[in-house]
Amino acid sequence: MVGSDIAERAAAVGMRVIGVDPKDIAPTAAVQRIVPPDMLLEVLPQANVQNSTVKRRTPAMHHSSSEQSRPQWQTNSRPRP
């Protein structure tokens, strides 16, 4: 996963890593603390560097039954080649 890879590299050079994840997951060797998204504004002032990685959602994922309870989204951007 991209976010985990970045966290590991950041920790390897001495950065303190705080993760934001909607799932209740435990911190790792690289990620010292994980908070839910509604706490982002609380932990953001502690950051010298901020990185955002999100899972790319395809139209097929958007319309799947597992996605029905999630907020709807739209994009005007075109896929990159």
Image (tube, rainbow, N blue to C red):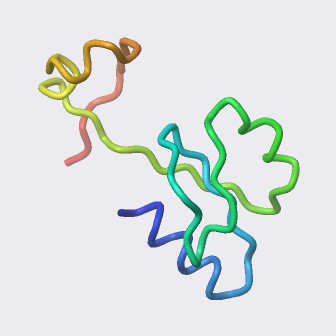
Q: Residue 38: give x, y in percent of width and height.
A: 68, 29
Q: Residue, x 15% and y 17% (percent of image)?
A: 65
Q: Residue 79: give x, y in percent of width and height.
A: 24, 37
- Quadrant that contains the N terminus: bottom left
Q: Is residue 20 left or right of residue 23?
A: right
Q: Is residue 30 left or right of residue 59?
A: right
Position of residue 51 relative to residue 36, above or below, is below
Q: Is residue 81 left or right of residue 12?
A: left
The image quadrant that residue 63 belongs to is top left
Q: Residue, x 46% and y 66% (percent of image)?
A: 4
Q: Residue, x 21% and y 23% (percent of image)?
A: 66
In terms of depth relative to the viewer, which is nearer, 17 or 33? 33
In terms of depth relative to the viewer, which is nearer, 76 or 23? 23
How many marks the image carries: the answer is: 0
Q: Is residue 16 left or right of residue 21?
A: right
Q: Residue, x 47% and y 61% (percent of image)?
A: 3
Q: Residue 30: give x, y in percent of width and height.
A: 59, 75
The image quadrant that residue 14 belongs to is bottom right
The image quadrant that residue 7 belongs to is bottom right
Looking at this rendering, what residue extends furthest in the right direction?
Answer: 45
Position of residue 12 relative to residue 33, above or below, is below
Position of residue 72 relative to residue 11, above or below, is above
